[in-house]
Every structure is written in C-alpha cells, then in structure tokens.
Amino acid sequence: MFCSYCGKEIAEGAAFCDGCGKATAVQDVPVEEAPATVMAGETTVLSENMIPPVQQEGHAMQPDAVFPTEEPVPAVEMVPAPKKRRFPLKWLIAAVVAVAAVVALLLNMSTIVGTVIKTFGSDTDYYKYVELKTVKSGTDTVADYYALIKESFTDNEKKVQGSFRPVLGEDAKELLQDYLPAEMKLDWLNDLKISYTGNYKDNVLLFELAVAVADGDPLKAIAILNSTDGKVFAALPSVSDTYLEFGMNDATAPETDGDGMAVAPPVMSTNSLLGEWLTDPELADDLREVLPTDKELDKLLDRYLALVLDMVEVSASKDTTLSIEGVEQTCTESTITITQKQCSDILIAVLNEAKTDKDIKAIIADVQKLVEERVEGEEIDLYDAYTKALDEALTSLKDAENEATNETFAAMTTYISKQHEIIGRRITVAGTEVLYYATAQKGSAFATEMTVGNAAKLSGKGTKKGDVVSGEYDVDVQGTVVAKLTVKDFDEGKAEDGYLNGTFRITPKKALFEMMGMDEDAALMIGTYDPSLEFVMKNSKNASEMAINLYKDESLLFGLVSEGKTSKADKVEIPENTVDGTDEEALMNWLEQIEGDTVEEKLRSIGVPEEIMDVLELLLGSSSESVTARPNVY
C-alpha cells in the first residue's frame, strides 16, 4: 500500500508512514495506479479522484505543481452515495389537477352539455334537452317504485316483523280520566306493546300476534295456513300447546248440494282458480317472467316522452328572474303552445307507436302464455283484443281530427335554472290556468309557491342542504289560510329511490273546521286547542319506522309508534299436536283443558291492571268457573 500523503510505499496494515510519519488516512482502500508507460515529456494532471502529495519537511510545495509520471501517483477512489429518485413535485400537482378536472367534468357533464346546447342550439332543442333530462329523472323514480312493488309481489318468501306501541300524553290522561273510574289508572298503556310476525315459505304462511306490558311475558296467538292442502291451524300457546285444525281445501268437495243445487267449491280448493294459483309453486317464477323489469318500464316511458317532445316547438323564450317571497333566482322562461290539431296528432302518434311496439307485444305474449297455462277451456287472444282497442281509439281520434282547429288549446311555460333544471311550470288550458308551481333558491334558502286553479294555494319557504329540505308552508283555500304544513329533514334523494324519510306536521285552522260544516262554537273550541297531526317517517329497503302523533299546541296528546323489518323467511313447521276444530266434541274437550283462572293469570302476568281484570271477571264470571260453561266468550 502507499501513503496517501507522501506516496511512499509502506507495509500493508501499517498505522503510520515510515517516510512522513503521518497516520494513514485511508486504509484497506486500493490505490488506482497510473499507466505503466508514459511518453517522455508528458505529465499527469491531478484529477478529482487523486489526492496530491503533501509537502515534505523542508520543501515548499509550489502551486499548480505537476509530477513526473515515471513514479506512480496514488489515488483514492471515492464511491458516491446513491441518490433517491424523487417524483417531481410539479408533476404530482399536475396529475392531481388533471384528475380533479376529469372528475369535475364528469360530475358537471349535464351542465356543460346544457350550456353548449343553449349557446349554439335553438330554443326548442334546448327545451327538449332540459325536459328529457328532468322528466327522465321522474320516470326513473316511477321505475324505482315499480321495482319495489314488483319485488314484494313476486319475491314473497319473506319474514316480516314489527310492532305497535301507543303513547299517551299527560293531557290525554286527564281528559280520559274524566270518563273513567277514579281508581282506574292509564299509565300502563305506555308500556303496552303489540308485536306481529308474518312468515311465508314453501306455501306455508305463519302469522303470530303477541301482546305484552312492560317486560312481562307476552300473550300470543298463532295462525298457520298451509296453502298446499288448505289446512289452517290456530292456537293460544300462552295457555295451551294444542292447535285447532280446520280443513279448507277439500279437492273432492261436491259441486252440488243434497238437493242437486250447484255450490261453489271451497275457496282454497284445488279445483278453484284461486286455490290452483295459490298452490302453484311456479307462480312466483312465472310472474317474474311476465312482469316487465323496472329498466324495461323506464325505457318505455322515456321513448314515449321523446315521441311527444318531437312534436312540440318553443314559441317564446327569454331570460327572467323568478321572485317568490323575497327569494330571487335568474332563469330561462320557455313557452310551448299546442293547438287542437297538434293535440290530436300527438295522441294518434302515441297510439300508432303503441300498436307496433315490439316491447309491449312481448309483454302481452308472456301474459298470454301464463293465462293459457292456467285457464283451461277458454281461448283468449290478448294481443288481438289489445290491437282492436287501439284501432277503435284511433278511429275515434281521426273522426275528431276533422273538427280540430289550429287554435291554441293549451300552453305551458317552463322556468329553467342556470344549471338547466326545471324549477317551475305554468299550465293553461283554453285560456284558464290550471296549475302553477315554482321554487326559487338562493344559496341554502328557498321559497315555493303552488296554485291549483283558483281553488287552492300552497306557499312557504325554508332551507335546503344537499337533498335534505326543511320549511314551513301555508295552505290557502279561496283566499283563506286553512292549515299550516311544517316539513323537517325531508330527504328528496331517498324519496326518489322510493323511501320516504322526514317529519311532516299539519296544523288545521279554525276556518277549515268551519268549511267542513262544523258548528262555529265547536270550531272555535278546537281552534283554541290548536291541534296538529304529525307524521315522523324513517324508511329503508328492509326496515321502516313511523310515528303518528296528535298534539295540543306543543303538548303530545296521543301517539302511535310502529316499527317493521323484513328478512329471509324461516321454515314453518306444521303442528302435530292438533284437535279437529270442526268436531264439536273434540272442540269441547279442548276448551275443558283451558281454565278461566289460567287466562286471568296470564293476563296479570303481562301486566294488565286490576281495574281491567275486574271488568274481565264480570264478563267471564267466577275465575273457578270452567270456560266450557261460557263457550260464546271465545
């Protein structure tokens, strides 16, 4: 190795240089040797990886010195630390901005398209775009509601559970106490709960009703219907585990009585149409095939809407300001007019389209197949009946078309916001306004006004945050305020999906009772109480909650709270411990097993007050008396 200061060769591993006495600065680092052969007169210039010799004792180092190359010059190879590659900040910012721009573009595509059409298109093109977009939202909502109804109708194997609970306010207790014995208390009513369960699976329906007070054991009643064989089972499991059995599905029931008179088969009999349909395990699947899907319905509605819009034209359009109760909003006002002849042409075009509509024909064909499979002996051509009905309507319209004129039959003015949303309409027929509604919004504040002919008017204002609306409205009938409507936390978004959520409170005025023909003194008394009816709703796909409350001023008089939920159906077991309910002797034996004191004991166990029990004892007689002595009670 060589000394890094003077360049003298020293022993491997030496701590100090024999020549200059300096401590070796770099150890165990190989020194890069200079080329072995150098041409005469050439010099080697120090490079950045070479360390120059340090001046030796007694010799001054000259600046910019060079050294002969005959003697190797030691050098230490410096290995630079690897640098981390970093994503340039400006590139990251540009990527974020680009993503945000794409998201904003997608979210506002409707606004952008509407602006382009409004700027470069005709007034009619712009109106059609807004109308299609707005009404499309309405048809989507209709399709959503239809889907919920169809699902509940075709997918009927479900379990439904719920409960009802009364709420009695202090004012109501005082009012009722005037008509009841002083010793009878009503506090227990607020602890009363009525629960129910409905479960349908494999053509077996179970319904259970339970009544309980506070945390007491419930008093239950159960009914089971087996639609396969038409048998019904009923029981009071709180007092007996034996079921009464009734047969409703006698497939061999005679079709004539003893005198030879024809009689109808049992309702649940397999030889009745209803019994056949209810006992058909494939009915639900067939109904799913027959009924159009929500998307098919939505498609049909949109197509016929577009057909109608293609036949109308905007007659006037201008920018204006909609002002309602101090809330102003700039908008576009577009008016279309329809003559008698246009109205006739539109109806004819719709009927002609419906007559050749392949989607409608396919739906009717599915219904036809279902009917043919289940109704024997009758040949019904549903599509032929459908087309004949349309032909008759078209003939009537064409006859009336000859008398139609080009005079204006109806006009509609539409108010369109800068966001290309319809915020109001005014409809007139034969020169008479039949409907007007509009909502102006500025920030979170809004005001609404609606009139129906000259009969009723609704007006009010409130706030809207996202899809949640709260406001207060006056209901006016022929110039007199008859009621006040208060809306709180109404979710418009969920309403479009078919679920009603929010609080709605109606406060009638004295004038309303007078219009209903109520005596003036009675109307004054009710008006003094300032009663109001409130509905509180919270709904989702598989659960619902609702409270109906009656108020006096702001004090709760009476309320009814209901809750419900749906889930996957459970298998229903057919009872084995049964008694023939149509056999009088067997029924009497079953009744003998139930003692009156057992019933009374059970009622007390669920918390029924003694005052109520006293009344029941008067009806039932002595608690030791057998129920068989008074079968009419049951």
Image: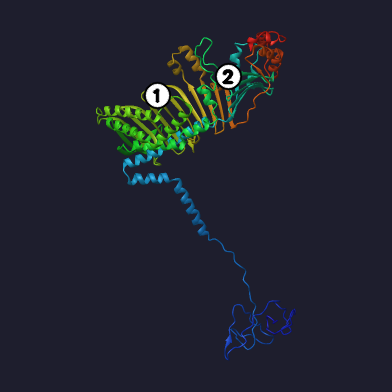
Q: Position of residue 168 (x, y in %)?
A: 60, 20
Residue 345, above or below 117: above
Residue of label 1: 456
Query: If you read the primary sequence from the N terminus, does the residue marked by circle 1 or circle 2 appear first?
Result: 2
Cα distance, mark 1 to mark 2? Answer: 52 Å
Residue 593 image-quadrant placement:
top right
Which is in the foreground here, disc 1 or disc 2? 2
Residue 227, above or below 39: above
Quadrant into which the N terminus falls? bottom right
Q: How many marks?
A: 2
Left or right of 52 on screen, residue 515? left
The residue positioned 56% from the left and 33% from the top of the image is 542
Task: Work out whether residue 622 can be spotted.
Answer: yes
Q: Amino acid at mark 1?
A: Ala
Residue 95, above or below 214: below
Q: Position of residue 336 (x, y in %)?
A: 31, 35
Q: Position of residue 256 (x, y in %)?
A: 52, 14
Q: Nearer the viewer, residue 12 or 143?
A: 143
The residue positioned 52% from the left and 31% from the top of the image is 284
Quadrant into which the C terminus falls? top right
Residue 131, above or below 41: above
Q: Position of residue 122 (x, y in %)?
A: 31, 43
Q: Nearer the viewer, residue 544 or 295?
A: 295
Residue of label 2: 248
Q: Amino acid at mark 2?
A: Met
Task: Work out whether residue 430 can be spotted.
Answer: no
Residue 69 image-quadrant placement:
bottom right
Colour pattern of the rendering:
rainbow
Q: Which mark is residue 316?
A: none
Left or right of 451 on screen, residue 81? right
